[in-house]
Amino acid sequence: RVQSADVKMLVCVNDDYVCSQVEEALPACPTVDHKGVVAGAFAVGSITAFGKAALEASANAEVLRKGLTFQLGADQADLLISKMKEIGETSAYDGSALIPMARLWVNVGDNAETAISKMNKIVDAGSAYGLTQEQIQNCTLALTQMAGAGKIDAGNMNQLTNDGIPAWKLLSDAMGVPVEQLRDMASKGDLTADSLNALWDGLVAKTQGASAEMQGTLMSHFTNLEESAQNSLAGIGDIISKAFDVSGILETAGEYVDQFKEHIASINEAITAGG
Protein backbone atom coordinates (compact mmCIF):
# COMPACT_ATOMS: atom_id res chain seq x y z
CA ARG A 1 0.00 0.00 0.00
CA VAL A 2 1.47 3.33 -1.04
CA GLN A 3 1.29 6.01 1.64
CA SER A 4 1.79 9.76 1.24
CA ALA A 5 5.15 9.48 3.04
CA ASP A 6 6.30 6.99 0.38
CA VAL A 7 5.53 9.45 -2.38
CA LYS A 8 7.36 12.27 -0.58
CA MET A 9 10.47 10.10 -0.26
CA LEU A 10 10.67 9.77 -4.04
CA VAL A 11 11.46 13.46 -4.36
CA CYS A 12 15.08 12.75 -3.40
CA VAL A 13 15.78 11.85 -7.05
CA ASN A 14 15.11 13.85 -10.17
CA ASP A 15 11.58 14.54 -11.27
CA ASP A 16 11.69 12.63 -14.58
CA TYR A 17 12.97 9.49 -12.86
CA VAL A 18 10.26 9.72 -10.22
CA CYS A 19 7.56 10.04 -12.81
CA SER A 20 8.93 7.13 -14.87
CA GLN A 21 8.96 4.92 -11.77
CA VAL A 22 5.43 5.92 -10.87
CA GLU A 23 4.28 5.18 -14.43
CA GLU A 24 5.92 1.74 -14.42
CA ALA A 25 4.40 0.90 -11.06
CA LEU A 26 0.94 2.14 -11.97
CA PRO A 27 0.17 1.12 -15.57
CA ALA A 28 -3.49 0.62 -14.71
CA CYS A 29 -3.95 4.24 -13.71
CA PRO A 30 -3.26 6.38 -16.82
CA THR A 31 -5.42 9.28 -15.64
CA VAL A 32 -3.22 10.05 -12.65
CA ASP A 33 -1.15 13.21 -13.06
CA HIS A 34 2.05 11.76 -11.63
CA LYS A 35 3.94 15.02 -11.72
CA GLY A 36 1.04 16.55 -9.85
CA VAL A 37 1.42 13.86 -7.20
CA VAL A 38 5.10 14.65 -6.79
CA ALA A 39 4.52 18.39 -6.91
CA GLY A 40 1.76 18.13 -4.32
CA ALA A 41 3.91 16.03 -2.01
CA PHE A 42 6.89 18.31 -2.45
CA ALA A 43 4.95 21.56 -2.00
CA VAL A 44 3.28 20.44 1.20
CA GLY A 45 5.97 18.18 2.62
CA SER A 46 9.02 20.30 1.96
CA ILE A 47 7.49 23.55 3.20
CA THR A 48 6.33 22.02 6.47
CA ALA A 49 9.56 20.09 7.06
CA PHE A 50 12.37 22.20 5.64
CA GLY A 51 12.75 25.52 7.40
CA LYS A 52 9.73 24.98 9.65
CA ALA A 53 11.45 26.37 12.73
CA ALA A 54 12.68 29.42 10.82
CA LEU A 55 9.26 30.18 9.39
CA GLU A 56 7.61 29.77 12.79
CA ALA A 57 10.13 32.15 14.37
CA SER A 58 9.52 34.66 11.61
CA ALA A 59 5.73 34.32 11.95
CA ASN A 60 5.84 34.78 15.73
CA ALA A 61 8.03 37.85 15.40
CA GLU A 62 5.71 39.27 12.76
CA VAL A 63 2.64 38.87 14.99
CA LEU A 64 4.35 40.60 17.92
CA ARG A 65 5.63 43.41 15.72
CA LYS A 66 2.19 44.01 14.21
CA GLY A 67 0.56 44.15 17.64
CA LEU A 68 3.14 46.57 19.02
CA THR A 69 3.00 48.68 15.86
CA PHE A 70 -0.76 49.00 16.29
CA GLN A 71 -0.25 50.22 19.87
CA LEU A 72 2.92 52.31 19.57
CA GLY A 73 3.57 53.05 15.91
CA ALA A 74 6.27 51.47 13.76
CA ASP A 75 9.30 53.38 15.09
CA GLN A 76 8.48 52.84 18.76
CA ALA A 77 7.62 49.18 18.15
CA ASP A 78 10.93 48.55 16.38
CA LEU A 79 12.79 50.33 19.19
CA LEU A 80 11.12 48.20 21.86
CA ILE A 81 11.73 44.93 20.00
CA SER A 82 15.37 45.70 19.23
CA LYS A 83 16.08 46.70 22.84
CA MET A 84 14.46 43.54 24.23
CA LYS A 85 16.58 41.44 21.88
CA GLU A 86 19.64 43.38 22.97
CA ILE A 87 18.83 42.80 26.64
CA GLY A 88 18.27 39.12 25.91
CA GLU A 89 21.62 38.76 24.16
CA THR A 90 23.49 40.46 27.03
CA SER A 91 21.72 38.83 29.97
CA ALA A 92 20.68 35.37 31.12
CA TYR A 93 17.16 35.76 29.70
CA ASP A 94 15.57 35.19 26.32
CA GLY A 95 14.83 38.44 24.47
CA SER A 96 11.98 36.79 22.56
CA ALA A 97 10.28 36.12 25.91
CA LEU A 98 11.01 39.64 27.16
CA ILE A 99 9.06 41.26 24.29
CA PRO A 100 5.63 40.04 25.51
CA MET A 101 6.59 41.11 29.05
CA ALA A 102 7.46 44.59 27.78
CA ARG A 103 4.13 44.66 26.01
CA LEU A 104 2.41 44.30 29.39
CA TRP A 105 3.84 47.72 30.28
CA VAL A 106 2.56 49.15 27.02
CA ASN A 107 -0.87 47.75 27.87
CA VAL A 108 -0.96 49.76 31.12
CA GLY A 109 0.05 53.01 29.44
CA ASP A 110 3.83 53.03 29.11
CA ASN A 111 5.60 54.10 25.93
CA ALA A 112 8.58 52.25 24.43
CA GLU A 113 11.20 54.16 26.44
CA THR A 114 9.57 53.69 29.84
CA ALA A 115 8.76 50.04 29.11
CA ILE A 116 12.40 49.44 28.16
CA SER A 117 13.57 51.13 31.35
CA LYS A 118 11.31 49.00 33.52
CA MET A 119 12.30 45.78 31.78
CA ASN A 120 15.96 46.64 32.32
CA LYS A 121 15.24 47.01 36.04
CA ILE A 122 13.29 43.74 36.14
CA VAL A 123 16.10 41.86 34.37
CA ASP A 124 18.59 43.34 36.85
CA ALA A 125 16.37 42.20 39.72
CA GLY A 126 16.00 38.74 38.21
CA SER A 127 19.77 38.50 37.80
CA ALA A 128 20.45 39.70 41.34
CA TYR A 129 18.02 37.30 42.99
CA GLY A 130 18.66 34.39 40.62
CA LEU A 131 15.18 34.21 39.14
CA THR A 132 14.15 31.95 36.28
CA GLN A 133 12.51 33.32 33.18
CA GLU A 134 9.11 32.11 34.42
CA GLN A 135 9.65 33.91 37.71
CA ILE A 136 10.50 37.24 36.09
CA GLN A 137 7.41 36.82 33.93
CA ASN A 138 5.32 36.37 37.08
CA CYS A 139 6.99 39.38 38.69
CA THR A 140 6.37 41.52 35.61
CA LEU A 141 2.72 40.56 35.69
CA ALA A 142 2.45 41.47 39.39
CA LEU A 143 4.16 44.83 38.86
CA THR A 144 2.05 45.74 35.83
CA GLN A 145 -1.14 44.80 37.66
CA MET A 146 -0.26 47.17 40.51
CA ALA A 147 0.73 49.86 38.00
CA GLY A 148 -2.59 49.46 36.23
CA ALA A 149 -4.48 49.73 39.52
CA GLY A 150 -2.35 52.68 40.64
CA LYS A 151 -1.69 51.17 44.06
CA ILE A 152 0.15 48.43 45.94
CA ASP A 153 -1.85 45.41 47.09
CA ALA A 154 -0.93 42.46 49.28
CA GLY A 155 -1.73 39.82 46.64
CA ASN A 156 0.74 41.11 44.06
CA MET A 157 3.37 41.94 46.69
CA ASN A 158 3.13 38.36 47.95
CA GLN A 159 3.45 37.14 44.36
CA LEU A 160 6.70 39.08 44.03
CA THR A 161 7.91 37.58 47.30
CA ASN A 162 6.94 34.03 46.31
CA ASP A 163 8.87 34.39 43.06
CA GLY A 164 12.02 35.58 44.74
CA ILE A 165 11.87 39.38 45.08
CA PRO A 166 11.60 40.50 48.73
CA ALA A 167 9.13 43.22 47.83
CA TRP A 168 7.90 44.07 51.32
CA LYS A 169 11.46 44.44 52.63
CA LEU A 170 12.48 46.60 49.67
CA LEU A 171 9.46 48.86 50.18
CA SER A 172 10.08 49.03 53.92
CA ASP A 173 13.70 50.08 53.41
CA ALA A 174 12.75 52.66 50.78
CA MET A 175 9.92 54.24 52.81
CA GLY A 176 11.35 53.75 56.30
CA VAL A 177 8.12 52.10 57.43
CA PRO A 178 7.84 48.67 59.14
CA VAL A 179 6.52 45.82 57.00
CA GLU A 180 3.51 45.18 59.24
CA GLN A 181 2.45 48.80 58.94
CA LEU A 182 2.86 48.64 55.17
CA ARG A 183 0.66 45.55 55.04
CA ASP A 184 -2.01 47.38 56.99
CA MET A 185 -1.76 50.42 54.72
CA ALA A 186 -2.04 48.20 51.64
CA SER A 187 -5.20 46.60 53.01
CA LYS A 188 -6.72 50.08 53.27
CA GLY A 189 -5.61 51.14 49.80
CA ASP A 190 -3.23 53.77 51.17
CA LEU A 191 -0.15 52.70 49.19
CA THR A 192 -0.69 54.55 45.93
CA ALA A 193 1.53 55.98 43.17
CA ASP A 194 4.20 57.38 45.48
CA SER A 195 4.53 54.00 47.16
CA LEU A 196 4.89 52.28 43.80
CA ASN A 197 7.70 54.70 42.94
CA ALA A 198 9.33 53.92 46.27
CA LEU A 199 9.16 50.20 45.50
CA TRP A 200 10.99 50.79 42.21
CA ASP A 201 13.56 52.96 44.01
CA GLY A 202 14.17 50.19 46.54
CA LEU A 203 14.49 47.60 43.77
CA VAL A 204 16.99 49.68 41.78
CA ALA A 205 19.05 50.52 44.87
CA LYS A 206 19.59 46.81 45.55
CA THR A 207 19.90 45.34 42.06
CA GLN A 208 21.04 47.93 39.50
CA GLY A 209 23.62 46.50 37.12
CA ALA A 210 23.24 42.93 38.34
CA SER A 211 22.55 41.52 34.87
CA ALA A 212 26.12 42.37 33.82
CA GLU A 213 27.38 40.13 36.62
CA MET A 214 25.49 37.18 35.13
CA GLN A 215 27.69 37.25 32.03
CA GLY A 216 29.93 34.22 31.91
CA THR A 217 27.58 31.93 33.84
CA LEU A 218 26.48 28.66 32.29
CA MET A 219 22.86 29.85 32.24
CA SER A 220 23.80 33.02 30.35
CA HIS A 221 25.87 31.07 27.81
CA PHE A 222 22.99 28.72 27.05
CA THR A 223 20.42 31.51 26.92
CA ASN A 224 22.59 33.76 24.76
CA LEU A 225 23.23 30.90 22.35
CA GLU A 226 19.53 30.14 22.16
CA GLU A 227 18.69 33.83 21.79
CA SER A 228 21.17 34.34 18.94
CA ALA A 229 19.90 31.22 17.21
CA GLN A 230 16.28 32.31 17.62
CA ASN A 231 16.99 35.75 16.18
CA SER A 232 18.87 34.15 13.30
CA LEU A 233 16.01 31.74 12.65
CA ALA A 234 13.56 34.62 12.47
CA GLY A 235 15.81 36.38 9.96
CA ILE A 236 16.21 33.20 7.91
CA GLY A 237 12.46 32.71 8.02
CA ASP A 238 11.94 36.21 6.60
CA ILE A 239 14.37 35.44 3.77
CA ILE A 240 12.73 32.10 2.98
CA SER A 241 9.26 33.62 3.08
CA LYS A 242 10.16 36.46 0.72
CA ALA A 243 12.43 34.52 -1.62
CA PHE A 244 10.04 31.61 -2.14
CA ASP A 245 6.76 33.49 -1.68
CA VAL A 246 5.71 31.11 1.09
CA SER A 247 2.50 33.03 1.70
CA GLY A 248 1.52 32.60 -1.93
CA ILE A 249 2.45 28.92 -1.90
CA LEU A 250 0.42 28.30 1.24
CA GLU A 251 -2.60 29.96 -0.36
CA THR A 252 -2.55 27.33 -3.11
CA ALA A 253 -1.46 24.47 -0.86
CA GLY A 254 -5.09 23.65 -0.14
CA GLU A 255 -5.63 22.90 -3.80
CA TYR A 256 -2.58 20.62 -3.86
CA VAL A 257 -3.81 18.79 -0.77
CA ASP A 258 -7.20 18.07 -2.35
CA GLN A 259 -5.55 16.86 -5.57
CA PHE A 260 -3.05 14.85 -3.58
CA LYS A 261 -5.84 13.04 -1.69
CA GLU A 262 -7.50 12.13 -4.98
CA HIS A 263 -4.20 10.88 -6.45
CA ILE A 264 -3.44 8.72 -3.41
CA ALA A 265 -6.93 7.21 -3.58
CA SER A 266 -6.40 6.40 -7.28
CA ILE A 267 -2.98 4.90 -6.56
CA ASN A 268 -4.38 2.66 -3.83
CA GLU A 269 -7.22 1.54 -6.09
CA ALA A 270 -4.80 0.78 -8.94
CA ILE A 271 -2.48 -1.23 -6.70
CA THR A 272 -5.41 -3.16 -5.23
CA ALA A 273 -6.77 -3.92 -8.69
CA GLY A 274 -3.34 -5.04 -9.89
CA GLY A 275 -2.94 -7.47 -6.99
Image (spheres, grey):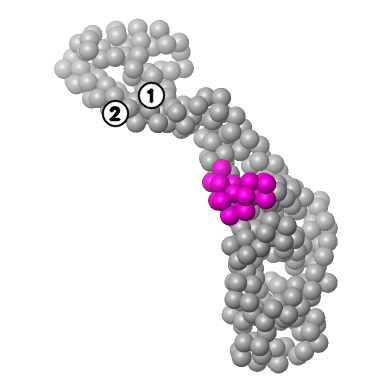
Q: Quadrant of residue 160?
A: bottom right
* Residue depicted at 34% across the width and 31% down the height: 254
68 up-or-down from 11: above or below: below
Residue at position x 59%, y 52% from top? 68
The magenta region covers 62-78
Mark 1: few/some/many CA within 10 Å (<14, 14-19, 20+) = many
Secondary structure under the numbered disc 2 in the rendered image: helix
Which circle's residue, 2 or 1, is located before the other in the chain? 1
Residue 258, which numbered label? Answer: 2
Query: Vertical placement of 255 versus 121: above or below?
Result: above
Tell me: residue 176, above or below residue 32: below
Asked if residue 216 is positioned above or below residue 124 in the image, the reply reads: above
Q: In the rendered image, which residue does mark 1 sit on? A: 41
Residue 64 on the magenta span? yes
Q: At x 39% / y 19%, what residue is drawn?
A: 39
Asked if the stretch drawn in magenta spans residue 183, the answer is: no
Q: In which quadrant of the rendered view does residue 153 lie?
A: bottom right
User: Where the C terminus falls, by quadrant?
Assistant: top left
Hey, which residue is sitting farthest left in the picture? 273
Q: Is residue 167 visible?
A: no
On the image, the x and y values in percent for residue 212 come to 82, 56
Amino acid type shown at disc 2 = Asp
Task: Please tell me which residue lies in front, 190 or 47.
Answer: 190
Residue 44: give x, y in percent of width and height. 41, 28
- Helix or strand or loop: what does disc 1 sit on? helix
Q: Nearer the viewer, residue 109 or 271?
A: 109
Q: Label 2, label 1: how many angstroms apart (C-alpha)? A: 11 Å
Answer whether residue 234 is visible to the viewer in this image: yes
Residue type, label 1: Ala
Relative image position of residue 231 (x, y in whole percent): 66, 41
Left or right of 108? Residue 18 is left
